[in-house]
Image: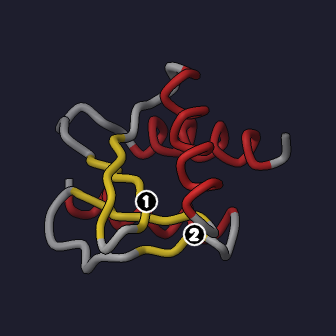
Amino acid sequence: LHAKAHYFADQLKMIDSHFEILNDIVFNQVIVRYYDDARTESLMQAVQNSGVCWFGGAKWQEKSFIRVSVCSYKTTYSDIDISIAHIASLLTK
């Protein structure tokens, strides 16, 4: 789970340099922000509505961020690649 969380974070940064990873990934969770509150929240909502994968959101120090958790041992790198491709497609809309 730890390696796959790192992979997810690395792939986010590869599709757009404006993804900011806010935490040291010590287990299975990535805390990420995209540009600003409005774009972070919009992206999170679009992902949640898509059904491809699901992100949780939260606020910290009055800023919005997305929580990406790799929670199942059944999650594959291919699953992550599908999610990343979908996220990339949302950024071009």
- Percent position (x, y) of residue 30? 32, 62
- Crowd rating for badge 1 (residues with CA inside 10 Å; few <14, some 14–19, many 20+): some
- Of badges 1 and 2, the one in the foreground is 1
Picture layout, residue 83 above or below residue 41: above
Colour style of the rendered protein structure: secondary structure
Picture layout, residue 39 above or below residue 19: above
Question: Is residue 49 shown left or right of residue 92?
Answer: left
- Percent position (x, y) of residue 27? 14, 64
Picture layout, residue 50 above or below residue 37: above
Q: Element type at marker 1?
A: strand
Q: Quadrant of residue 93?
A: top right
Foreground pick, 78 / 18: 18
Taking the spot 43% from the left edge, 57% from the top edge, the residue there is: 8
Q: Element type at marker 2?
A: strand
The type of residue carrying mark 2 is Phe
Question: Is residue 91 shown left or right of residue 81?
Answer: right
Q: Residue furthest front?
A: 62
Q: How many marks?
A: 2
Question: Is residue 91 shown left or right of residue 51?
Answer: right
Q: Quadrant of residue 73?
A: top left
Taking the spot 41% from the left edge, 59% from the top edge, the residue there is: 65
Q: Which circle's residue, 1 or 2, is located before the other in the chain?
A: 2
Picture layout, residue 84 above or below residue 34: above
Q: Residue furthest right?
A: 93
Q: Which residue is mark 2?
A: 19
Q: Which residue is mark 1?
A: 64
Taking the spot 63% from the left edge, 69% from the top edge, the residue there is: 35
